[in-house]
């Protein structure tokens, strides 16, 4: 009898639990529910909490509950401040008599509101939430998200929708990238041409690529929004925010506990302003170089004053502690031959153009400090010297010591390394886990250094993201993993348990009409080898989704064959699979080639003496084709234990990594090749993995049937701006093989 009773209580408790993200620090779920019915009164104990009460009323209305905010301490829901609660934390008590929400501060209260919002949206019965006691607070104070509105413009409504969604996941910093070469998006009244002309452009190569992707991938999310076009014939494309628009967005974010960090990128990425006003660059000739654009001229006083004028107006619009100055990807060849820049270097006693950039950054920082602000810059501001008061956003994964350098100097740092936090890069199967399990406080940092880690943010660069639909699709669900990484203590985290909670999160996002990306279909590879018979097995995480496929090369549509179970093949078959949501919206396509193979025979004649590892030949290659790598100037040979970029190899990189693959037994082997940019893998002269294209980090996973013994092995790779290269090899049972056991040269 007692056992039955205990099992009943456990089952009821499990039923009552809500799959919240981020996971609370402490939650006690109780038997029963509280129903918010009738005209709900949301009471706020002090006037500064009225915006939070209004925010909650809007959330209740979204859940179908009528609500009004009122001053006082009596209501179905009561908001107040509480003592003994950690900064930005909250205590939530849901009892039979109502809801009590106490926060350490305003941000703590709205964090509690976010929890209530998720409870309502996850509830199967509208306006019903489980009885619970939750005590919660964030691990990091900086839980950020970034949006580039220069490459493609997003409307006020779209930006506010993003902010509202991020508040749902307790994100609290919005890094708003407002200017870049492709468009100036913020009104500066002293310089009206910045938006009148700099906010618009004729179609550029990024726009053309978006239209190409729309055709090639059968995806309307890449089409340029028609409401951002003006004129007839050769139309202009773009848009900008008036200062009143900015004030509206700032107020909207403030209500949700989110501070906005505006970025005005300088001295590089400034072409949209340089084109409008003379005298900002070193020479009259301006435009694009091999990779980047003409920068500002630090030798000209007029340019310094121009930048200060811009910041004066920006600071009036954003009443927060931080602003972002950019400072990344600045070509210095103009400065090397500019008389004004060389005079500045001499007058200021600077060593070189790197110190000239640091001098300019320090000039801007001093101005910002005098106006009560702190400056943030990309990690390039380390070069030439970092001021004591600057904060750094670390993004360059190929500068792995940046965090240690910054914090050792006593400066604060924010994590946003391109891999895995550039969510504008197409999602890979491993991304969710990589984000969720990322170590923000590695052991190599001292306890003192760890105190300078403010937190983490997810970045969305929009070169190939022109629409609200594509933008949200790229943010979700990876941002959900970022939110739990930034909020929840490591000892409370478990990836498999988190992944299980995503099912309810997908249902919530669907209810909010958010176009999210279903995690990659699983159960197969890009290339799947078989000798006699192959079987396509598909695993889909989203229970709301339908998977359809074709085998004739056509794009799957809502009439294509629906996957309902394993599909057996006895000849080479090329599958194209696509996920569809309940309304028929199509997700991206996935290709799965099933290739019938014979075993590749091992090498008959092997050198008498071979050593562990591989040989990596470095060529100074700046192109985009693996086949061309050996045509570039040879730089040197390196012995490597694994497929990787050898230490000391940088700049223009072309690698040819050769040797033998020691196969332990006959079987079908799996090769997971990830690279940024392009790569290929050949075995015995046969192409096994073709990853040969300019790209962000991308993994191709392919199989090959191999006989036991040694096989000729070659990996080629190219990149000209940092990059990464990695190869994992698995046996037929799925065991990852040790590089020391399989590579010889």
Image (cartoon, rainbow, N blue to C red):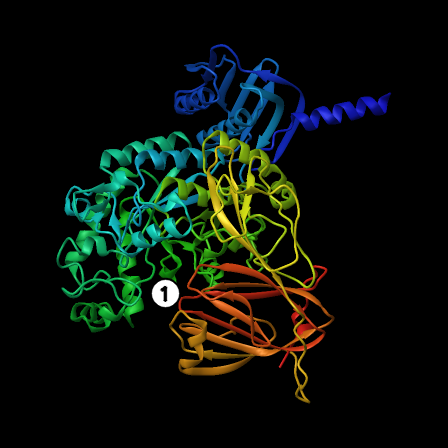
> In this view of the protein, can residue 82 be seen by the observer?
no
- Looking at the image, which is closer to me, 83 or 80? 80
Residue 224 visible from this viewpoint: yes
Residue drawn 38% across and 43% down? 220
Please state, as top left, top right, bottom left or bottom right, where the C terminus lies in the image: bottom right
Q: Which type of secondary structure does the marked residue at label 1 adopt?
A: loop
Using the rendered view, name the quadrant where residue 334 is placed: bottom left
Position of residue 337 relative to residue 453, above or below, is below
Q: Is residue 447 above or below residue 339?
A: above
Quadrant of the image containing the N terminus: top right
Is 268 in front, or is 584?
A: 584
Q: Toward which corner of the image does residue 24 lie, by quadrant?
A: top right
Residues 222 and 178: in front is: 222
- Residue 197 at x, y percent in the picture: 17, 48
Indicate left or right for 106 with 315 as reference: right
Instruction: Name the residue: 36% across, 34% down.
Output: 160
In the depicted view, which residue is nearer to us: 712 or 196?
712
Q: Residue furthest top?
A: 38
Give the image location of residue 371, x and y in percent: 27, 45
- Residue 190 image offset from top left, x and y in percent: 14, 44
Residue at numbered disc 1: 383
Residue situated furthest bottom in the rendering: 608
């Amino acid at each position: 009898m007692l056992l039955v009773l205990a099992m009943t209580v456990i089952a009821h408790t499990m039923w009552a639990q809500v799959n919240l993200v981020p996971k609370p620090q402490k939650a006690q779920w109780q038997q029963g529910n509280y129903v918010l019915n009738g005209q709900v009164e949301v009471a706020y104990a002090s006037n500064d909490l009225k915006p939070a009460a209004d925010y909650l009323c809007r959330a209740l209305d979204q859940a179908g509950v009528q609500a009004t905010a009122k001053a006082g301490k009596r209501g179905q829901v009561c908001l107040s401040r509480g003592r003994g609660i950690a900064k930005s934390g909250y205590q939530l008590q849901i009892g039979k008599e109502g809801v009590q929400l106490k926060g350490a501060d305003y941000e703590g209260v709205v964090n509690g509101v976010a929890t209530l919002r998720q409870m309502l949206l996850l509830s199967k019965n509208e306006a019903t939430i489980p009885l619970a006691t939750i005590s919660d607070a964030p691990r990091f104070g900086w839980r950020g998200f970034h949006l580039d509105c220069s490459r493609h413009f997003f409307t006020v409504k779209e930006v506010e929708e993003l902010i509202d969604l991020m508040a749902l996941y307790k994100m609290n910093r919005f890094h708003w990238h407002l200017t870049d070469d492709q468009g100036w998006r913020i009104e500066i009244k002293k310089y009206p041409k910045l938006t009148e002309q700099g906010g618009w452009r004729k179609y550029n190569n990024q726009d053309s690529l978006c239209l190409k992707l729309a055709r090639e991938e059968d995806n309307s999310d890449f089409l340029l929004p028609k409401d951002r076009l003006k004129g007839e014939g050769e139309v202009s494309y773009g848009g900008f925010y008036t200062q009143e628009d900015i004030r509206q967005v700032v107020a909207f974010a403030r209500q949700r506990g989110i501070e906005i960090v505006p970025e005005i990128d300088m001295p590089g990425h400034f072409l949209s302003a340089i084109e409008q006003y003379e005298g900002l660059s070193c020479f009259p000739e301006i435009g694009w170089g091999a990779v980047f654009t003409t920068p500002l001229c630090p030798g000209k006083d007029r340019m310094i004053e121009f930048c200060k004028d811009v910041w004066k107006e920006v600071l009036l619009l954003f009443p927060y502690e931080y602003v972002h100055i950019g400072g990344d990807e600045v070509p210095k060849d103009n400065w090397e031959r500019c008389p004004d820049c060389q005079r500045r270097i001499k007058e200021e006693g600077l060593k070189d153009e790197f110190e000239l950039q640091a001098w300019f950054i320090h000039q801007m920082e001093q101005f910002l400090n005098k106006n009560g602000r702190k400056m943030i810059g990309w990690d390039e501001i380390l070069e030439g010297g970092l001021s004591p008061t600057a904060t750094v956003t670390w993004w360059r994964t190929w500068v792995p010591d940046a965090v240690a350098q910054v914090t050792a100097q006593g400066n604060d740092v924010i994590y946003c390394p391109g891999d895995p936090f550039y969510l504008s890069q197409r999602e890979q199967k491993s991304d969710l886990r990589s984000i969720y399990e990322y170590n923000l406080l590695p052991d190599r940092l001292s306890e003192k250094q760890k105190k300078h880690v403010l937190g983490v943010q997810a970045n969305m660069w929009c070169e190939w993201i022109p629409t609200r639909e594509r933008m949200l699709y790229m943010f979700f669900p990876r941002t959900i993993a970022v939110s739990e990484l930034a909020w929840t203590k490591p000892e409370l985290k478990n990836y498999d348990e988190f992944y299980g909670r995503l099912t309810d999160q997908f249902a919530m996002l669907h209810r909010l009409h958010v176009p999210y990306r279903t995690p990659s279909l699983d159960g197969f590879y890009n290339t799947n080898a078989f000798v006699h018979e192959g079987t396509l097995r598909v695993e889909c995480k989203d229970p709301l989704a339908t998977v359809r496929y074709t085998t004739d090369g056509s794009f799957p549509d809502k009439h294509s064959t629906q996957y309902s179970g394993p599909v057996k093949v006895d000849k080479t078959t090329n599958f194209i699979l696509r996920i569809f949501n309940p309304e028929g919206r199509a997700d991206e396509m996935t290709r799965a080639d099933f290739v019938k193979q014979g075993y590749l025979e091992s090498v008959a004649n092997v050198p008498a003496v071979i050593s562990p590892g591989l040989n990596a030949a470095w060529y100074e290659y700046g192109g985009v084709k693996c086949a061309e790598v050996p045509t570039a100037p040879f730089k040197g040979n390196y012995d490597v234990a694994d497929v990787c970029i050898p230490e000391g190899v940088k700049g223009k990189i072309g690698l040819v990594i050769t040797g033998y693959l020691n196969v332990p037994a006959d079987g079908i082997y799996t090769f997971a090749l990830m690279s940024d940019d392009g790569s290929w893998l050949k075995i015995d002269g046969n192409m096994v993995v073709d990853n040969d294209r300019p790209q962000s980090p991308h993994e191709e996973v392919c199989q090959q049937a191999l006989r036991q013994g040694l096989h000729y092995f070659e990996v080629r790779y190219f990149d000209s701006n940092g990059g990464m290269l990695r190869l994992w090899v698995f046996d037929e049972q799925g065991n990852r093989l040790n590089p020391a056991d399989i590579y010889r040269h």
